Image (cartoon, rainbow, N blue to C red):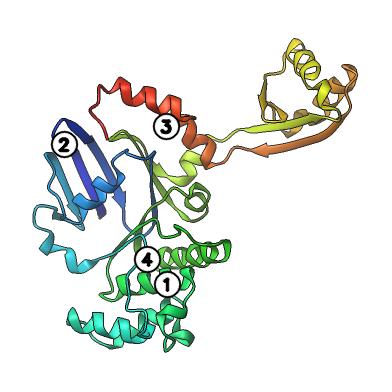
Amino acid sequence: MSVVRTTELTRRFGPITALDRLTIELPSAGVIGLVGPNGSGKSTLIRILLGLIRPTDGTASVLGASVHDPRDYAARVGVLIESPAFIPGLSARSNLVSLARLRNLPLARVDAVLAQVGLAGRDREPVKRFSLGMKQRLGIAAALLSDPELLILDEPTNGLDPAGIVEIRELLRDLGRNGRTVIVSSHQLSEIEAVCDHLVVIRFGKLVFSGPMVEVMSRTREHIDVAAEHQADTDRLQAALAADGWAVTAVDDVLRVAAGASRAADLNRAATAAGVTLRRLLVAQDNLEQIFLEMTGRVDGELANGRAATDGKVA
């Protein structure tokens, strides 16, 4: 069963079209990344899926139920929107017990979710002593209290230090492996690449890509970064390589050559023939960030031009 399905989903705010005939079908189980430039409609889509706003046109369903009546699926969905709010002076356990009682959930779920997010040994400490990573884990624990089939997380690693990011990454992987569906909206593309099984890319309210992560990563290409020992030789090296037929692009202080590992020795010989000694020769693979920028626009100017091309219809 598809956990989320939309058909020609459209949402307008006056003259602004935030979602433009969006049609997607998301599989159940695993971690799904939702990405796009700022103002591309990701938050609008999440609000529609949660029943907070109605679509202008088109249809959408969550866990087989229409978003027009979110009561049919609300208890089966857990949500964490950015930084969770808790009573600082209360312990993690007390905060979760209060939430469970408010929602008429069995208190046994408190111990279950504390163990699930790795806070079982810290559950009696006041939340004010928690790191940001621990607070995010506690927020995910609160979202898991009802044992939901679908978990929606908006920027779960926002503001975290590297250790906190690793904590959340491992937690999301575990949730996906255990058969739960997790939708993650984030600007941390390296984390999306590391943790997600499926990817959805939206640009100005329109669908750019939806499919398995392995499919989008199959678009990656190898390249070789080279740098001359003396920076003054960089322009001469670029001209010589281009004259020899190499596809070369200057990227910061290195030259990026469109070639794979099998051509590395040839490239080194070409530099030597040009009278240039290399201080760097590195074979690398494109990552999700590079593919994302190719899909959506590499710089603010490209994005601004894209917005202008929509005649002000997308926000």
Q: Residue at x 25, y 21 (%)?
A: 311
Q: Secondary structure at mark 1?
A: helix
As displayed, is residue 64 above or below residue 119? above
Name the residue carrying label 2. Answer: 12
Instruction: Identify which residue, 253 or 274, lies in the foreground.
Output: 253
Earlier residue among tags 1 and 4: 1
Q: Secondary structure at mark 3?
A: helix
- Which quadrant is the C terminus positioned in? top left
Residue 66, percent from left and from top = 12, 53
Q: Residue at x 54, y 62 (%)?
A: 161
Q: Is residue 59 left or right of residue 78?
A: left
Q: CA distance from mark 3 to mark 4?
A: 31 Å
Q: Amino acid at mark 2?
A: Arg
Residue 33, percent from left and from top = 40, 50
Q: CA distance from mark 1 to mark 2?
A: 35 Å
Earlier residue among tags 1 and 3: 1
Name the residue carrying label 3. Answer: 296
